[in-house]
Every structure is written in C-alpha cells, then in structure tokens.
Image (spheres, rainbow, N blue to C red):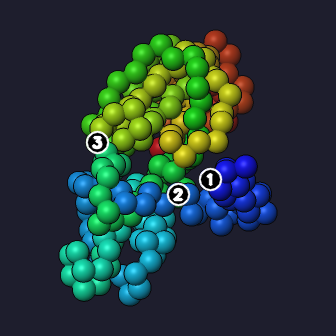
Amino acid sequence: MSTRIAFAKAVAAFCLLFSALCGVAFALESDSNRPGSDYRSLDLPHADPQLCQAQCDREGQCSSWTYVKPGVQGRAARCWLKHSVPQARADNCCVSGLRTGGPVARPGMEAGTNRPGGDYRNFDVSNADPQACQAQCMQEGQCHAWTYVQAGIQGPSGRCWLKSTVPAARPDNCCVSGVVSRAPPEANACQVNCEKRCRERGRPGGTYRGGICLLGVPDENACGCN
C-alpha cells in the first residue's frame, strides 16, 4: 500500500469519527482567492482563516469570504466579506470559502436546499438575490417551484431554475429553493368580492378570512374591511 493511499484512508477514518471538524476543515479553500464583490473588510486579531469564516456566517448579507495572510496587506491578517460568490483563483496569499450555512434566505425560502428536476426554463440573476427567482416563479402560472443557484457555481452570476412540478428537496449549500402556493380560483374570487364590498362601503379594501363563500361571494363574517 502506498503512503498516499494509507494517508487518505487515515483521513477518511478520522472524518468518520470527527465529521463536524472535517466539515469545517474541508470548507476552507487553501491557496485560493475570490476577488471582488466585497462589502467590507476587517483586520483579524489572530492569523486564523476560521475567524473570517465565522464572521461571514454571522452577517446576513455575506455569501463568501477571503482571508489574506499576515504581511500581504499589512501586519495583521485581513478578512474580506463578500455579498456574492466571485470565481475562485489559485493564489497562495489567501484562504477563501463560502458561507457555511449556504445562501441567505428570507421567509418562505428554503435555505441550503436544492430541488433538482422539473425545469422548464432558467436564467441568470445578476444581483445574486434568490428573491428575484422567487418573484419570477410567482409571476408565471406554470411555475410551481424554483431553485436559485448561487453565483460562482454555474457561472459568474447566480442562476434561477423555474420548475413546472415540485421536485423533492435535497440539502445542498449551493442553493436556495422554494415552492409557490397559489390560492384556488374560488378563494381569489372571494377576495375580489370582499374588497369590492368594502370599497362600496367607503373602506379602502377588505380581506377574505376564509369560511362560507358561495359562488365567489363571501359571507359577512368571512369578509373583514380594512
């Protein structure tokens, strides 16, 4: 058995015992720089790239980071936090990485989730914001689910995949996904009639609360005027 194979097996065995620690170690991209998309930088008290990684994880707008070794941009190590995921470049000045928790998601979004399959079209998202993908899906009647792939994985920009079905969700830090829920036509008609009834009474609008609604006309108790 060669020394390299023996070492690989030893690492694999170590990872089985200490999987959490290995996950952190292999998340660090040694001798890698991801230039661009910086929104702030800071000096670090210790020469440890995991301090930069931890800072990125704490900030909601951070998607990736680059740690610059001491002596390159000053006496101290420096951490650059990025609002997107620039392309990685080999450079022994630095250590880089992605946000540990995956792309940032808002309410109604599935962070760190991929829904592969069911695609009917895809497009670039220039502002690296999964909300643009979610909004486009909601505008298209045939779209039932979506997946946003963060920048730097399928190209320099983020990419939105719109789906005509609802594929099974899989954990994957590459992505943010979501499912679009649309009210049935009857509920939409009830909402429209509720708003109309309230405006006729001099109120700015109304909200259909659910309940009795026959032929699209809500019961008095099911319509609340604003």
The image shows residue 92 at horizontal and vertical percentages of: 32, 63
Residue under circle 1? 4
Dot 3 or dot 1, earlier in sequence:
1
Residue at x 28%, y 42% (from the top left corner) = 127
The image shows residue 90 at horizontal and vertical percentages of: 32, 52
Q: CA distance from mark 3 to mark 1?
A: 43 Å
**Dot in front, 3 or 2:** 2
Residue under circle 2? 27
Residue at x 35%, y 24% (from the top left corner) = 123
Q: CA distance from mark 1 to mark 2?
A: 22 Å
**Dot in front, 3 or 1:** 1
161 or 73: nearer the viewer: 73
Tell me the quarter of the picture where residue 61 sits. bottom left
Residue under circle 3? 127
Residue at x 65%, y 56% (from the top left corner) = 3
Q: Is residue 210 found left or right of 138 in the rendered image?
A: right
Dot 1 or dot 2, earlier in sequence:
1
What amino acid is at disc 1? Arg
Neighbours of disc 3 within 10 Å: few (<14), some (14-19), many (20+): few
Residue at x 54%, y 36% (from the top left corner) = 177
Q: Is 215 rendered above or below residue 114?
A: above
* Residue 8 seen in the current view: no
**Dot in front, 1 or 2:** 1
User: Answer yes or no: do the residues labelled 1 and 2 have beta carbons within 8 Å?
Assistant: no
Element assignment for label 3: loop
Element assignment for label 1: helix
Element assignment for label 2: helix
The image shows residue 12 at horizontal and vertical percentages of: 71, 54
* Residue 164 seen in the current view: yes
